[in-house]
Amino acid sequence: MNEITLHSPLDMHLHLRDEEMMKLVTPLTTETFSGAVIMPNLVPPVDNLKSLLAYRERITAAQGSDVFEPYMMLFFRQYTEAELVEAKEHILGIKLYPAGATTNSEAGVKALDAVEPTFKMMEEMGIPLMVHGETHGFVMDREKEFLASYEYLAKKFPKLQITMEHITTADAVDLMGRYENLRATVTLQHLIITLDDVAGGMLNPHLFCKPIAKRPEDREALLQAALEANPSLMFGSDSAPHPLSKKECCGCAAGVFTSPLAIARLAQLFDKHGKLDNLQAFLSDNAQRLYGITPLEKKVIVSKQAFVVPAAYEGHGQTVIPMHAGETLDWAVSSIT
Ligand code: DOR
Ligand code: ZN
């Protein structure tokens, strides 16, 4: 196959930031994706309906005339029932960060058992829970150590839909398959790279993200699950732009910026393994079914032709370096209608 038509591709985990950075990066998603789940880790976090609706308006202003739906997320805290009732129709779910686990998560949860009343209400009201699943342990073990918490929650709240965000380990793939209410997103970079690509040779800050890329056998398990369009797995880029000055420095911020090339690179990856037929499910159908959403119609044709990834994306006084900067991909988005 030299071409594939995708219907309403979705990015189920995206950071759009705010202000000038948001103005630069938003169109780089809204051009090719039909919808995306917008992460709420702003400063201060998006943890009330008023700020969520205002943020949504800033995003839709930045997307211009693109056909695109931002699926909004609240930042997890203990909510009252009245707050959840009011928010429910405006959100896809609530994103839980363990306090201090990643960028702008200081206001996150310190102890899971203290917030169970909110989980209970979310379960009863059918509000999904999205989780950054890492402990504060040794960096390579943080996700694995968190799996027991996922399992505890999956058992204790069997009707609560729990998304294990950006999984990076074979163990997480395994756990996902064992509970009906556990599903997961996986990023582009975790299907392609291992820790060696980040720190095995010259340090590559543009591939540094949380959770950090793991071992070859982890990447293999993630890749196989994606290629076979495992029905519990969805694409979530976790595209996380930081200004150049925050990446190429001492104290590099975590995040890989992949939005503008994600679809082309995924097509190249699925083609390489002879699995292009499964890309639609991974990029849209699984998410539609798991969340019960019907995205806006958008037809994206991806073709086997050269695409030179820009060395940088610049505008609004911002500079962001994408993954594969300056490299030539074999696949390109060739038409969007
Ligand atoms: O690498 C990451 N960057 N991981 C996250 O969980 C957050 C994100 C960000 O917001 O920069
Ligand atoms: Zn994220």
Image (cartoon, grey):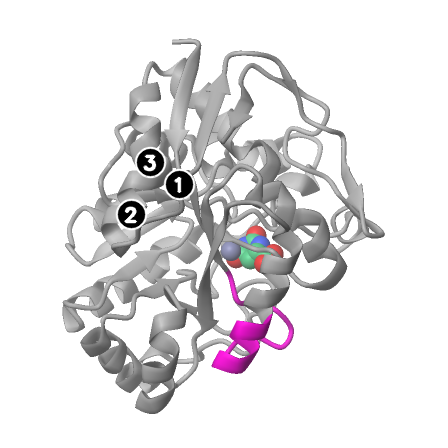
Q: Is residue 77 above or below residue 142?
A: below
First-in-chain label (3 vs 1): 3
For image coordinates 64% across by 45% down, the residue present is 27
CA gap between label 2 and label 3 equals: 10 Å
Mark carried by residue 104: none
Q: Is residue 254 visible?
A: no
Q: Secondary structure at mark 2?
A: helix
CA gap between label 2 and label 1 equals: 12 Å
- Residue pointed to by mark 3: 282
Mark carried by residue 288: 2
For image coordinates 34% across by 40% down, the residue present is 284
First-in-chain label (2 vs 1): 2
The magenta stretch is 39-54
Q: Secondary structure at mark 1?
A: loop
Q: Quadrant of the N terminus?
A: top left
The majority secondary structure of the magenta stretch comes to loop
Q: How many marks?
A: 3
Is 47 inside the magenta-drawn segment? yes
Ligand 1's quadrant: bottom right
Q: Residue furthest top?
A: 1
Mark carried by residue 297: 1
Residue type at the position of mark 2: Gln
Mark 1 Cα within 10 Å, few/some/many (few <14, many 20+)? some
Residue type at the position of mark 1: Glu
| Disc nearest the viewer among 2 and 1 | 1
Percent from the top left, x then y, of residue 102?
A: 56, 62
- Residues 227 and 3: in front is 3
Is 149 inside the magenta-drawn segment? no
Q: Say left or right for 305 vs 151.
A: right
Q: Say left or right for 152 vs 316.
A: left
Task: Examine the image and state in which quarter residue 15 appears.
Answer: bottom right
